Image: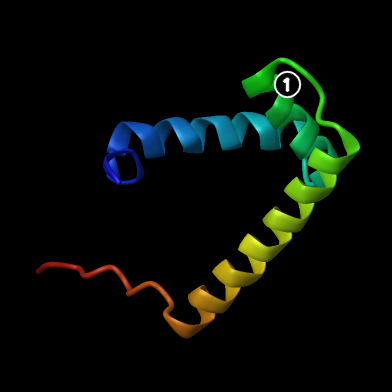
Amino acid sequence: LQMMNDEQVRESARYLAARVMDAAGSDVRRQVERLYLATLARFPTETEQELARKSLSAMTTQWKSHYEAQPPAEPVVFK
């Protein structure tokens, strides 16, 4: 729980995600490969590749559903 809520951990995760997206673009298969290379110094097996893509797809669907149900509040402008 501490790691999930720690700002430094979230910042590191955002940085890693940006590195992967910069290197792989929107190709999910390449994103998974780049993530494995960056974190484990190896390519994923076919089973790992498939599980990662399914997990990413499920998380994307869940995030979109959550975002549509609870869009972020508009920023408040103080006068």
Few, some or many residues within 10 Å of mark 1 (<14, 14–19, 20+): some
Residue appearing at x 73%, y 21% in the figure = 37
Q: Is residue 41 above or below residue 66?
A: above
Seen at 59% across and 35% down, the residue is 18
In the rendered image, the quadrant that contains the C terminus is bottom left
45 to 38, vertically: above or below = below
**In the rendering, at what x and y percent does residue 71 appear?**
43, 77
* Colour convention: rainbow
Let me know if residue 27 appears in the view. Answer: no
**Residue visible at 76% across and 37% down?**
32
Compared across the picture, whether 79 is left or right of 24 comes to left
Q: Amino acid at mark 1?
A: Leu
Residue 40 in picture, x, y percent from top left: 67, 20
**Depth check, front residue: 65 or 46:** 46
Position of residue 16 measured from the top left corner of the image (x, y, whole percent)? 56, 30
Counting every numbered tag in the picture gives 1
Residue found at x 68% / y 64%: 58
Residue reaching furthest to the top:
41
Q: Is residue 57 visible?
A: yes
> Element at badge 1?
helix
Looking at the rendering, which quadrant does residue 59 occupy? bottom right
In the image, is residue 71 above or below residue 21? below
Instruction: Say whether residue 68 is left or right of residue 48.
Output: left
Q: Residue furthest left?
A: 79
Residue beneath disc 1? 37
Q: Residue furthest bottom?
A: 69
Please state if 67 lies on the left or on the right of 55 as rendered. left
* Along the line of sight, the residue nearer the viewer: 79 or 58: 58
Q: Which residue is most to the right? A: 46
Q: Residue 38: horizontal and vertical position, in percent?
A: 66, 21
